[in-house]
Image (cartoon, rainbow, N blue to C red):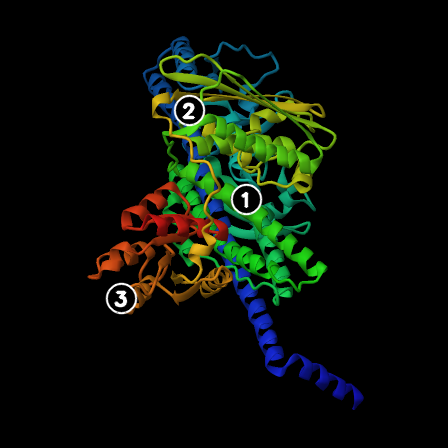
């Protein structure tokens, strides 16, 4: 009885409605997290299936093309020799043909051939001039016996592993029409091995495998697997694969081994061989695990921040037809990454907004404030990773363009120095900045991309250098030629360095030299890749020198046009900048946003700055609310781009066409996760005044609103 009274007192002190509301919010948050995780899991499975199918189909096509050329070579030579036998040509003349043909195909195709040879007219003939030992009996060799016993046009003789070269060799042999003569050709399978290795490089977590009809590994992304016979193994992943492949007819299936899950895609190729694309799903599921864990944390702290991770259903519409063309597959992957990155930025906007609002509560306990700061740090780190993926997808899709704009080179370098020196100071590192005295004041080029390239290198230098250590940044300039100057940027650190053997893969996407470093230092493995692409796009060059444990030096060289000093902008007037805060107090804003939680977060942020707002759940509703409002009711419109019913650009055009004076004057600012240059252009062309990317920085929004209203 006492326990029940105590429980009632607790409920009464909290308030029944508040308690029920809190429980409902918690349950809804958990439910939303589960739904979002399930959707993301479903999307990841679709991505794995698409990538695995692409790898299997494309590699099988390359394998078949490679083998078909060699098969047709033997068939063609066999037809010629057959005719010569029917014409009763002497063996010497046949040998001359084989010799000439062997030399011809070596020059015209590749060096995998050792020459045509065979048992013809009861004699051994070798187009490469090889003379067998006395104990060599051609009619007892596998190439002869298997060709005689096989009814196929061409027999793929059982491959074998050359222990000295660690290369798989096989023979293509064909029985001639007299029933006893055989023509043959030895080839190496080095190109097939290269194709399997390319699969592993281009798709992290994937393996390319080729098995012959006896279960022997004749190509594998892992060289250590070459020559093994999976049908003879037990207790290995290869044995599990062989059991499914040779005891069934499945072309797509899943296997589990040692706690790991694999998806397998199989294509039949020449020689009754099997081309296999094997994907370790852990690589694809790692981002899912990170996001799910972060979502669980937010669910526990639902009184502080509520988060829902949404997945774009449009990702289902990825073109499966791209599986037949490697270039199309790359475009499909880029589109998927771009859409996924956009959708992930949306919940990050919610996280950062709610986190910012919660941190303004003066009654927070120290522990709660520390947890909120950690949430903000984690969300910003996740945003950096998403931005890298987004930038990489733009590069791969070919949408990246260079700007040609004037900028102050001195301000450019000062900004870099401020950013890096602050990072070094936080980590206890020395920062040395050396700039040549004779640097141009103004240049023309794409300053944002050059800045990002250098920040990536400087950021890595700080990241991989422990205190006490030194980061050096030097800038040099060569005399101008043809209206341009050559700039040389040197980034040097005393950090952990790299093994020179890793340098050929330094600029590959999603790679780091040591997986332990990934856990220790973090990062997406895209920084140097993006830097390399930007420098190449600018027509520049990047060099690296490194030694394990001794540090790394990057040297970036680019050429930029000189700006005419006469066109330099006048210096800004002295005096403090006018704060936009007081001028925005009392403004009434229309928020066009399809996600209610996003709108609530933005409305709360505006309210903290003294502004009020109304919400329109789509573009059409925004047009209706504005059209029905009196003149001057709304001071500005914050417009999302992607919305159902009517998107932001269509809504903006509709508002501008309304027959009322303020329709053409009211500031319309795009607030969207679409952050590409082309998105900004589309917004301005649609009639918007400015563009601001999500996650929303309230200080930037206040400044932009103030300047836009002042211009109006």
Residue 571, position in %: x, y?
42, 31
Which of the two residues, 136 or 305, is positioned nearer the viewer here?
305
Q: Which residue is drawn at 62% across and 15% down?
A: 135
Residue 484, position in %: x, y?
39, 17
Judged from this view, the residue extending furthest toward the front is 575
Q: Distance between the residues labelled 1 and 2?
A: 30 Å
Label 1 vs label 2, nearer the camera: 2
Work out whether mark 1 precedes mark 2 in sequence or the reverse, and give the earlier one: 1
Q: Answer left or right for 620 relative to 615.
A: left
User: Number of labelled discs?
Assistant: 3
Q: Answer left or right for 589 relative to 24.
A: left
Judged from this view, the residue extending furthest toward the bottom is 1
Characterize the local packing of mark 2: few (<14), some (14-19) or many (20 or more) Cα atoms within 10 angstroms: many
Q: Is mark 2 on a helix, strand or loop?
A: strand
Q: Residue at x 71, y 23 (%)?
A: 550
Q: Which mark is residue 627?
A: 3
Work out whether mark 3 precedes mark 1 in sequence or the reverse, and give the earlier one: 1
Is 370 situated above or below 396?
Answer: below
Which of the two residues, 85 or 621, is positioned nearer the viewer here?
621
Label 3 vs label 1, nearer the camera: 3
Q: Answer left or right for 261 relative to 334.
A: right
Q: Can residue 572 be seen in this view?
A: yes
Characterize the local packing of mark 3: few (<14), some (14-19) or many (20 or more) Cα atoms within 10 angstroms: some
Judged from this view, the residue extending furthest toward the right is 2
Q: Distance between the residues labelled 3 and 2?
A: 47 Å
Q: Distance between the residues labelled 3 and 1?
A: 40 Å
Residue 553, position in %: x, y?
61, 22
Residue located beneath label 1 in the image: 384
Residue located beneath label 2 in the image: 442
Q: What element carries label 1?
A: helix
């Amino acid at each position: 009885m006492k326990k029940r009274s105590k429980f009632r007192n607790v409920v009464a002190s909290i308030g029944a409605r508040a308690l029920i509301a809190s429980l409902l919010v918690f349950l809804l948050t958990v439910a939303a997290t589960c739904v979002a995780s399930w959707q993301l899991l479903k999307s990841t499975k679709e991505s794995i299936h698409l990538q695995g199918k692409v790898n299997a189909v494309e590699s099988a096509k390359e394998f078949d093309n490679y083998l078909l050329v060699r098969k047709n070579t033997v068939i063609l030579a066999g037809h010629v020799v057959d005719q010569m036998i029917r014409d009763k040509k002497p063996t010497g003349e046949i040998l001359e043909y084989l010799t000439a043909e062997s030399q011809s195909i070596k020059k015209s195709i590749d060096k995998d051939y050792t020459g045509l040879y065979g048992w013809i007219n009861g004699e051994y003939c070798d187009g490469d001039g090889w003379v067998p030992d006395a104990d060599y009996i051609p009619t007892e060799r596998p190439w002869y016996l298997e060709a005689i016993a096989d009814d196929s046009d061409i027999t793929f003789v059982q491959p074998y592993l050359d222990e000295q070269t660690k290369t798989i060799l096989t023979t293509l042999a064909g029985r001639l029409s007299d029933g006893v003569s055989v023509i043959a050709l030895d080839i190496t399978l080095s190109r097939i091995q290269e194709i399997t290795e390319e699969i592993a490089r281009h798709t992290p977590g994937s393996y390319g495998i080729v098995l012959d009809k006896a279960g022997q590994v004749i190509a594998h992304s892992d060289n250590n697997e070459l020559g093994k016979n999976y049908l003879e193994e037990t207790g290995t992943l290869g044995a599990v694969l062989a059991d499914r492949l040779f005891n069934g007819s499945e072309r797509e299936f899943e296997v589990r081994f040692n706690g790991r899950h694999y998806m397998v895609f199989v294509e039949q190729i020449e020689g009754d061989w099997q081309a296999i694309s094997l994907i370790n799903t852990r690589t694809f599921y790692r981002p899912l695990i990170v996001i799910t864990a972060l979502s669980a944390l937010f669910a526990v702290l639902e009184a502080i921040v509520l988060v829902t991770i949404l997945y774009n259903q449009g990702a289902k519409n990825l073109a499966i037809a791209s599986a037949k063309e490697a270039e199309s597959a790359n475009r499909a992957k880029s589109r998927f990454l771009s859409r996924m990155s956009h959708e992930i930025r949306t919940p990050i906007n919610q996280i950062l907004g709610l986190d910012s609002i919660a941190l303004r509560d003066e009654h927070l306990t120290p522990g709660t404030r520390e947890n909120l700061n950690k949430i903000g740090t984690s969300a910003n780190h996740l945003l950096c990773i998403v931005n890298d993926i987004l930038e990489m997808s733009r590069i791969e899709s070919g949408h990246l363009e260079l700007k040609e704009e004037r900028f102050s080179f001195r301000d450019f370098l000062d900004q870099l120095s401020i950013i890096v020196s602050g990072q070094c100071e936080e980590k206890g590192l020395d920062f040395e900045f050396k700039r040549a005295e004779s640097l141009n004041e103004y240049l023309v080029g794409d300053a944002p991309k050059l800045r990002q390239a250098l920040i990536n290198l400087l950021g890595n230098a700080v990241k991989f250098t422990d205190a006490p250590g030194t980061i050096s940044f030097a800038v040099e300039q060569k005399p101008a030629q043809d209206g341009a100057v050559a700039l040389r940027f040197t980034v040097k650190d005393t950090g952990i360095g790299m093994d020179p053997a890793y340098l050929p893969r330094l600029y590959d996407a999603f790679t780091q030299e040591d997986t332990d470093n990934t856990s220790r230092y973090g990062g997406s493995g895209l920084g140097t890749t993006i830097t390399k692409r930007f420098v190449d796009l600018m027509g520049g060059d990047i060099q690296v020198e490194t030694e394990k444990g001794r540090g790394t030096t990057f040297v970036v060289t680019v050429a930029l046009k000189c700006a005419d000093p006469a066109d330099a902008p006048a210096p800004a007037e002295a005096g403090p900048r006018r704060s936009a805060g007081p001028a925005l107090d009392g403004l009434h804003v229309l928020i066009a946003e399809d996600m209610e939680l996003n709108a609530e977060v933005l409305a709360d942020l505006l309210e903290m700055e003294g502004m009020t707002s109304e919400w329109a759940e789509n573009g059409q509703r925004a047009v209706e609310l504005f059209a029905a409002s009196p003149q001057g009711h709304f001071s500005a419109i914050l417009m999302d781009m992607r919305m159902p019913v009517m998107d932001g650009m269509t809504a903006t055009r509709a508002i501008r066409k309304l027959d009322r004076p303020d329709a053409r004057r009211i500031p319309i600012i795009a607030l969207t996760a679409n952050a590409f240059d082309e998105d900004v252009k589309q917004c301005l062309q649609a009639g918007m005044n400015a563009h601001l990317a999500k996650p929303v920085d309230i200080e930037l929004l206040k400044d932009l609103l103030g300047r836009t209203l002042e211009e109006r």
